[in-house]
Amino acid sequence: MTPTNEKEMSMREALHLALDQALTADDRVFLLGEDIADPGASGPTAGLSTKHGRDRVLDTPISEAAIMGAAIGAAIDGLLPVAEIMIMDFIGIAADQLINNAAKLRFMTAGRTTAPITVRTQVYSGLATGATHSQSLEAWFMHIPGLKVIVPSTPRDGKGLLTSAIFDDDPCLFVETIRLQAQKGLVPTDPGFSIPLGVADVKRAGSDVTLISYGRSVQEALAAAAALESDGVSAEVIDLRTLVPLDVDTIVASVRRTGRAVVVYDAVQFAGPGAEIVAILQSECFDRLAAPIGRVAAPFVPTPAAPNLEALIYPSAARIVAAVQKTFDRAQARG
């Protein structure tokens, strides 16, 4: 649907609007999670229990396993649950049900039963919350057939992708970044507005190098592209938006055209999402690559709690610029 009305709002407001409109549009939609109902609610769910009732916006006990189990059972019964796991680090407690029940349900029933659940969770990176409250664990779930993984970077994408996730037949893990909650942008207010899953977005066109990113790191990639422009380097910035399904066609077409690529993400670099992306590009673009593909991500260490140390581990525009420069240097060295 082509949007007809737009309004500037924050990511938090955009996600709130998506949830509000979904609850209004379909009686099968309901929300469940810890502290998501008023008066304790904050973030995207604030005010929704007052408007739609506590039978559709359910506060749960502090049990991630109970939240996930209830969501899966409700989905099997024909409802469209949106479950919130407050912090992504806690999702391991519910991982068995998400991985072995929700993600396998369509396969195990030969397509007769699906698990149309949306699991919203937040990453607290960049807020000095320490090693067990700040992890970007999306790579875990990319490895699970049957599960979709979504990480928006803008308010517009947040609303459109969350709407698609809620009404998708398969379980979707929707990863929000707390540091983006206050970010503002134009968002279509039409109830029918959605963004298809598996379609990347070219946030900035370029011809010399492709920067591939998602979530918070997209902003750093855009800042790096602006800095590179002053040095005469034209950088294309691709926002993946969904990691599963992955828009392979868009990234391959871009890298075959630019001949260089740097993959940027907040998760730990080792065995992170970038490893799969680099492997795909190496296979599909080998004959067009002018230099090895670069990665800019977190080092293989627990997240420090000290703000000055934490700031050093996440991708920055300066680190991305340095990685791009390295691809040019290595291309020159090859002759």
Image (cartoon, grey):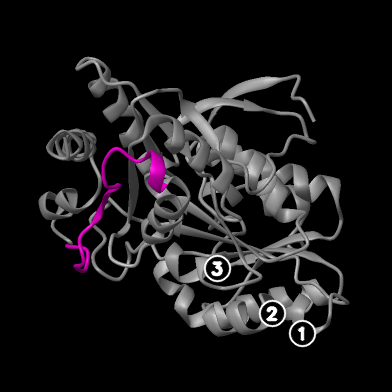
Q: Are marks 2 and 1 in contact (CB under 8 Å)?
A: yes
Picture quadrant of residue 172: bottom right
3 vs 2, front mark: 2
Span highlighted in magenta in the image: 286-304
Amino acid on which disc 3 is placed: Glu
Q: CA distance from mark 2 to mark 1?
A: 6 Å
SS category of the residue bearing label 1: helix
Q: Which residue is mark 2?
A: 104
Residue drawn where x is 51% and y is 30% of the image: 202
Q: Is residue 270 above or below residue 214?
A: below
Q: Residue 113 at what x, y percent from top left?
A: 84, 76
Residue drawn where x is 33% and y is 21% of the image: 234
Is-magenta flag for residue 138? Answer: no
Q: Residues within 10 Å of mark 2 (few under 14, many from 20)?
A: many
Is-magenta flag for residue 289? Answer: yes
3 vs 1, front mark: 1
Q: Nearer the viewer, residue 33 or 137?
A: 137
Q: Residue 2 at what x, y percent from top left?
A: 77, 25
Q: CA distance from mark 3 to mark 1?
A: 30 Å
